[in-house]
Amino acid sequence: MDDLVLAPGLYIVATPIGNLGDLSPRAAQILTKADLVAVEDSRVTAGLFRHLGVKGKMAPYHDHNADAVRPGLIARMASEAVALVSDAGTPLISDPGFKLVRDARAAGHAVTTIPGPCAAIAALTLAGLPTDRFLFLGFLPAKQQARAEAIAEIATVRATLVLYESGPRLSACLSALAEGLGDREAAVAREITKRFEECVTDTLTGLAARYADAPPKGEMVVVVAPPGEAPPASEEDADAALAEALTRLPPAKAAGEVAKKLGLDRKALYARAMALKA
């Protein structure tokens, strides 16, 4: 495979989140053969190249310079293979890479993904919480009011929540989540794939207390369980919903609509609708 020549275009390459052994053979091959590698921090990616035993040609691409350097990278893709990496994990997850992909496609360049490690997905597998539906939130706002508003927006989402947080802000974040979501089950994963990997599970308030006086270093992944089952609708709820539906629909259709909305028995709702109509 040493004689491989990459076709021009953009290659999105996932890199290890801690353990260098997680770099896939295909990812190593792409990074070795690429004409240019767009990186968040050249010092970090240089360590990866040392692991590979090659000296890759790197160009910085991060939040502070992305708009300025993106046109040049797009132009080079016409005749060169340009790889995109983040400092760790899968590019485009909480970084500006999506704009590079968008513009590369708009310019007609081929875009190829080389999948691999992702801290959010790895933490989700460690947490032991439902995985059939999950919502990735990235980093919540640092300021208290903005963070509370962001949490309020997703309080009723019936999915496991996955977010990133830094060690110094971890306890405050967990407390804010408990206040805005209720004291749900949660997990904090850190040092994922490394020697001292851990995933601590408890309630949100329990985790907030655990890390209040001893904030861990680095970045964590917080995984929060979905909300519990909603309480069954009361007779008052059903009557109010039926009364509103009857202003628009005949009794049978009104009963069907409310049954679907509130999870109640359609026949009983129809009888009640007829009584209300009378």
Image: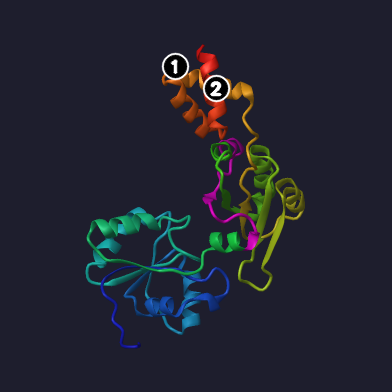
Sequence order check: which comes first, mark 2 or mark 1?
Answer: 1
- Figure quadrant of residue 9: bottom left
Name the kind of residue labelled 1 in the image. Answer: Thr
Mark 2 lies on a secondary structure that is: helix
Which residue sits furthest bottom? 2
Residue range in magenta is: 126-149
Q: Is residue 164 magenta?
A: no
- Residue 35 position, x and y percent, is 31, 75
Label 2 – label 1 distance at C-alpha: 17 Å
| Marker count (numbered) | 2
Tell me the crowding category of disc 2: few under 14, some 14 to 19, or many 20 or more residues within 10 angstroms, Cα based: some
Pick the front one: 16 or 132? 132
Which label belongs to residue 142? Answer: none
Pick the front one: 71 or 158? 158
- Residue 249 position, x and y percent, is 42, 21
Which residue in the structure is indicated by mark 2?
Answer: 271
Tell me, yes or no, whether the two marked residues, 2 and 1, touch with CB atoms within 8 Å: no
Mark 1 lies on a secondary structure that is: loop
- Figure quadrant of residue 19: bottom right
- Name which residue lies at 45% across and 56% down: 95
Tell me the crowding category of disc 1: few under 14, some 14 to 19, or many 20 or more residues within 10 angstroms, Cα based: few
Pick the front one: 91 or 253? 253
- Residue 172 position, x and y percent, is 68, 45
- Quarter of the image with the N terminus is bottom left
Name the kind of residue labelled 2 in the image. Answer: Ala
- Residue 199 position, x and y percent, is 68, 62
- Figure quadrant of residue 131: bottom right
Which residue in the structure is indicated by mark 1?
Answer: 247
